[in-house]
Image (cartoon, rainbow, N blue to C red):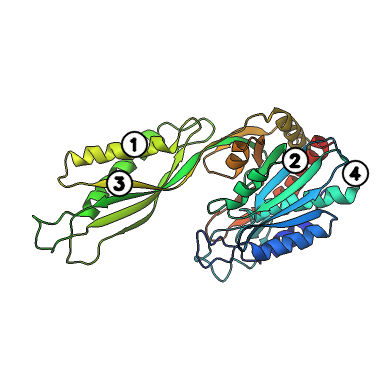
Amino acid sequence: MPATAEQVIDLLGAMVRIESVTPWLIPTGSGEAKIAGYIADWLDGTGAEVEIVEVESGRPNVLARLRGTGGGPTLCLNAHSDTVGYAGWPDEALVPRVEGDRMYGLGSADDKAGCAAAMLAFARLAESGVRLRGDLLVACVADEEGSSIGSEHLARQGGMDAAIVIEPQPTHELVVEHQGFGWIDVITRGVAAHGCEPDVGVDAIVHLAEVITRLHRLDREAFQQHPSLLNSRTVFHTGTVTGGTDYATYPSVAQVGIEVGTQPGEHLSDRVAEIEAIFAEIAGNEPGFRGEVAVKLEREPFVARGHEALQSVVSRAMTDVLGREPKITGMNGWTDAALMQAAGIPTLLLGSTGGNYHTVNEWASISELVRLCDILERIARDYLA
């Protein structure tokens, strides 16, 4: 018998109450230690082999294994226990609220719903007493919202024959690829001078504005006009901007932080080359222009490979639960699926619907999460039999 709405609400609500903001993004964030303890205690009650693995100090993964009789594969269900910050709704974010089919709260969809689905499917399978040949491994990993140290560590450990990464996604969609991305600082350098010395000063902020204008044009004319069939338009947006010292001085440095995507077959070097071409164009018109690129984080796109046997099982389970075949698709975000696949582990991505990710009033669909629990349990029964 699959998990119930009441079980979903109880478990997800308990996890929402635990602050697990990644300190990679928000230095005051608590990290995953407290929620890892809760997850481990909850899973320990199922009879699982539970291990808390410190990836970095205070940054643990939780691994729970339901061991089979032997001779079968190991399937990993991967979800992340960390969240982004909640400065926009400090009094509400950690107080789960149910209205109709939705649970509101920080991480309710991204990705504590994924952890809850994996945990509940694991528990139902363990309670059923069924003896499968293969092992089911649930990994609630750290830091996906930061630099993904949790899944990097997990992938290096190996010992997995296939993986399903769980992220917020309509329940009827099965993701087989998605974009990569880079976090890049674009820096312009001018010459500091008194505000009344225009023949001496070079305005780094004006030059940065020229760069940003052309990046916006690149997004509008290239990325928006030529979207990927599966992964939509290539991601581009500015994130941060700094520059200058005071009203009376020409600014000697200005900087914009951007997030930019890469489609399968592309690399971040393609985006860097486009930015450098913008530099060359501006330098031809703006005396004294100097620009540079600093790559802060680079992640490759995800394309599933060697996944055909797993996909057959997943598609059958989704069809049985939902009453229709899944939509095979991609997505324009990035997930740890790319790291699992890059380690040679055939990987797919699925999830349940939510909304307002990374912002005020994040929510998760309770009914879809119930169905996801059922789907995951069926997948494990079939794939590990």
Real-space CA distance between mark 2 and mark 3, rounded to the nearest whole angstrom: 44 Å
Q: Residue at x 47, y 42 (%)?
A: 181
Q: Where is residue 291 drawn, in percent x and y?
A: 27, 46
**Residue holding disc 1:** 274
The circle drawn on residue 98 is: none
Q: Amino acid at mark 3?
A: Glu
- Labels 3 and 4: the sequence-earlier one: 4
Q: Is residue 48 above or below residue 182?
A: below
The circle drawn on residue 75 is: 2
Label 1: how many Cα within 10 Å (few below 14, some 14–19, many 20+): few
Q: Tell me where residue 268 sits by quadrant.
A: top left
Q: Where is residue 107 drawn, in percent x and y?
A: 61, 58
Real-space CA distance between mark 4 and mark 1, rounded to the nearest whole angstrom: 55 Å
- Labels 4 and 1: the sequence-earlier one: 4
Q: Amino acid at mark 1?
A: Glu
Q: SS of the residue at dot 2?
A: strand
**Residue holding disc 3:** 292
Is residue 247 shown left or right of residue 150?
left
Q: SS of the residue at dot 3?
A: strand
Q: Is residue 88 above or below residue 287?
A: below
Is residue 345 shown left or right of residue 255?
right
**Residue holding disc 4:** 130
Q: Where is residue 301 drawn, in percent x and y?
A: 52, 37
Which label sits in the foreground, 2 or 4? 2
Q: SS of the residue at dot 4?
A: loop
Q: Residue at x 46, y 32 (%)?
A: 266
- Labels 1 and 2: the sequence-earlier one: 2
Q: Is any part of residue 97 visible from this angle?
A: no
Question: Dots 1 and 3: beta carbons under 8 Å?
Answer: no
Residue at far bottom of view: 91
